Image (tube, rainbow, N blue to C red):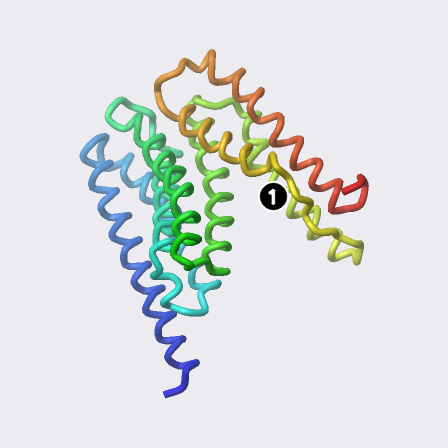
Amino acid sequence: MSGRYVRERARMAATATVGVVAAGTAIGGWMLVAGAVGDTAANRWVLVTGVVLTYVVGYLAYHLDDGTAALALPNLLTLIRGGLYAAAAGFLFVPPVSPIQWAPAVCYGTGVALDFVDGRLARRTGRTTDLGTKLDLAFDTLGFLVAPLVGVAWGRLPVAYLSLSAARYVYRAGIGWRKRRGRPVGDLPESRARRPLAALQMGFIAVALAPVLPTSVVHPLALVVVAPSLAVFARDYLAVTGRIDR
């Protein structure tokens, strides 16, 4: 039995295991939401969550080369983050009634907390992998997309805050366009501000989703908080395209 065959079987087994867990999460979540606010809201929740969970499992399957890598504890924590962000996304079309008004904040906030654990655990245990790096970046981007969308839908965040979600995709589209045109694209410059600002945005989104601060405070604060992150995106694009000195 060739090593390639063994790796392929392990990859398929790992993907199937994650897929079964994702399906169980969707079913369990549907039951919880249905018990709290009824079947109609639960159906809306599971529809959106199911789409996002499909993306999570599909992304894993596409990038997974070794099944054992996916089942390493740091990567499992990262996959749980993806599931939590999918659960938060499910509330996009669910009204923010009292039995579930804390749910998006809890789901997203728990995912953010795990984001500070999985990478450190991987480095301490020597289990850093290319897969883990890809999952971490993909699910960070996913969280920055779905959580602000829920925040806007629930009136907790201003529409302008979605510029943060769009910035990542605009940046990637701009880089991709330049590459297709054969224009030079440099390496991303070092930045001391990038990671702290990302952590700031994650923490702010979690707080904004929670029904604690009034929207009269959250909305103007959101515009202040998002500005430096947008500036960093703009600086990075100008740097990699050679428009400013690195």
Label 1 belongs to which residue?
Answer: 169
Asked if 224 appears above or below 202 in the picture, the reply is above
- In the picture as drawn, the residue positioned furthest to the top comes out as 216
- In the picture as drawn, the residue positioned furthest to the bottom comes out as 1
Q: Residue at x 51, y 43 (%)?
A: 141
Asked whether, in this view, residue 226 is left or right of residue 55, the answer is: right
Where residue 76 sits, quadrant-wise, is bottom left
Q: Quadrant of the C terminus?
A: top right
Asked if 195 appears above or below 154 in the picture, the reply is below
Q: Is residue 232 visible?
A: yes
Where residue 213 sits, quadrant-wise, is top left
> x%, y% of residue 163?
59, 31
Asked if 78 appears above or below 237 in the picture, the reply is below
Q: Quadrant of the N terminus?
A: bottom left
> x%, y% of residue 165?
55, 36
> x%, y% of residue 207?
40, 25
Q: Is residue 48 visible?
A: no
Q: Residue at x 44, y 30 (%)?
A: 203
> x%, y% of residue 220?
54, 15
Q: Crowding near pointer 1: few (<14 within 10 Å), some, many (20+)?
A: few
- The type of residue carrying mark 1 is Tyr
Q: Residue at x 31, y 44 (%)?
A: 46
Viewer-nearest residue: 161 or 77: 77
